[in-house]
Image (spheres, helix red, strand yellow):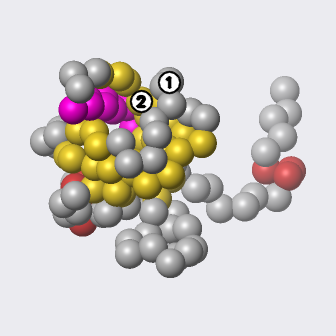
Amino acid sequence: MFSVEILIKPNENRRSPRIDVDIPATMTGNSNWRSICRIADLSCHGARLATFTALPRGTVLWLQLPDQPARKAEVIWSDDFSAACQFYQPLSENAVVGLVGRFGFKVEPERPVEHMIMVA
């Protein structure tokens, strides 16, 4: 069993909260192209991708997340090497929690600066 601290960004008119992550993934397109990418944030309904190729809006792709079946998604917006996609079928909450537990960022509470200084 594990515990996870989840940082939820403001709603911004989204169907589900998005969570900062760093997940390695693979994209496959309908015209048989394939590329690696990183998932920068994740929600039940979509993800923001850091890519090595530009993805035009409307591109349909299959996103392979670790330990998950490939998930069909459509690019909603893109900007240089960043793109947001919406899943055709949402991820389950358990899948999101599992991925965030493995690939999410842990937020440390603020500490006084004197606690961060090492004394030799």
In this picture, which residue range is highlighted in magenta?
A: 22-30
Q: Residue at 55% of width from left, 68% of height from top?
A: 9
Q: Amino acid at mark 2?
A: Cys
Q: Name the residue at 82% across, 58% down.
A: 112
| Residue 29 covered by magenta stretch | yes
Residue 105 painted magenta: no
Left or right for 120, reference 102: right
Residue at 28% across, 21% down: 33
Q: Residue furthest left?
A: 69
Q: Position of residue 56 (x, y in %)?
A: 46, 40
Residue in view at x 13 percent, y 42 percent: 69
Observer-nearest of 44 and 31: 31
Q: Residue 6 placed where, x, y %?
A: 45, 63
Q: Is residue 100 visible?
A: no
| 78 lies above or below 1 | above
**What quarter of the picture does the N terminus occupy?**
bottom left
| Secondary structure predominantly adopted by residues drawn in magenta | strand
Total numbered labels placed on residues in the image: 2
* Badge number at residue 37: 2
Residue 99 percent across, percent down from the top left = 31, 48
- Disc assigned to residue 52: 1
